[in-house]
Amino acid sequence: MKKLLQYLVPILLCFTVQAALADLEISKAPKTVTLQEKLGGHLDGRTWSSEEFKGKVSVVFYVDPDKKDLNDQASEALRKANYPLEKYQSFAIINMAATWLPNAAISSSLEKKQKQYPNTIYVRDYKKLLVKEWGLSDDNSNVLAFDASGNLIFRKDGQLDENEIQTLVKTVHDHLE
């Protein structure tokens, strides 16, 4: 048992340190992540990169398909704010590996969401890359906002309450000016 612990403890520490380093920090740009081919990408198959956040204030919903409606109130509040599209963009990145639902069913749901939110950029993550690289909460709905330089300005894992929605909307508004 003692020998097992000698090997197990350093391994567990490596994973803990790696997870801590992966976490996003407010006011800092995250590690660049690229989704392409078997890893995912835009709905039309094009490669997606987190570099796309730069140049505009960006809001990202990273969502388990089973939790797709969890932050609809936040989506609706942002839509009603009617931010200028030359300064603002939103992304819905779908954690495709977080559900038992078949990809065809998810795609059908995404098409409906695309009609409801035509200015949102939809992206698929087939291998939980953002969970692994950024330390996002798996099997959940994560909401992030980035300034035009790509620095994180807001993060919430899980459902936003009314105060958090107001904070998100105000944070986005303040960074548009």
Image (tube, grey):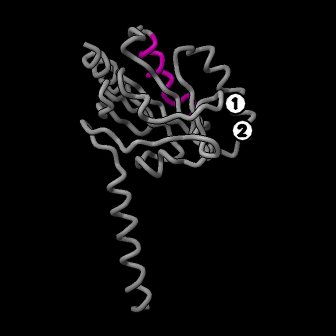
Which stretch did the figure color magenta? 67-79
Q: Which picture quadrant has residue 170?
A: top left
Above or below for 7 versus 164: below
Name the secondary structure under disc 1: helix
Q: Are marks 1 and 2 in contact (CB under 8 Å)?
A: yes
| Distance between mark 1 and mark 2 Cα atoms | 6 Å
* Position in image of residue 138 (x %, y %): 50, 47
Figure quadrant of residue 86: top left
Magenta highlight on residue 8: no
In the rendered image, which residue does mark 2 sit on? 103
In front: 131, or 148?
148
In the image, 136: left or right of 37? left
Residue type (three-letter) at the residue carrying disc 2: Asn
The three-letter amino acid code for the residue at tag 1 is Ser
5 over 71 or under it: above or below: below
Residue appearing at x 53%, y 36% in the figure: 63
Residue 148 image point, x, y percent: 31, 24
The residue sitting at 50% across, 41% down in the picture is 34
Quarter of the N terminus within the rendering = bottom left
Q: The C terminus appears in which quarter of the rendering? A: top left
Q: Which mark is residue 107?
A: 1
Of helix, strand and loop, which one carries label 2? helix
Image point (43%, 19%), residue name = 89
| Residue appearing at x 39%, y 91% in the figure | 2
Q: Is residue 92 visible?
A: yes
Q: Nearer the viewer, residue 35 or 170?
A: 35
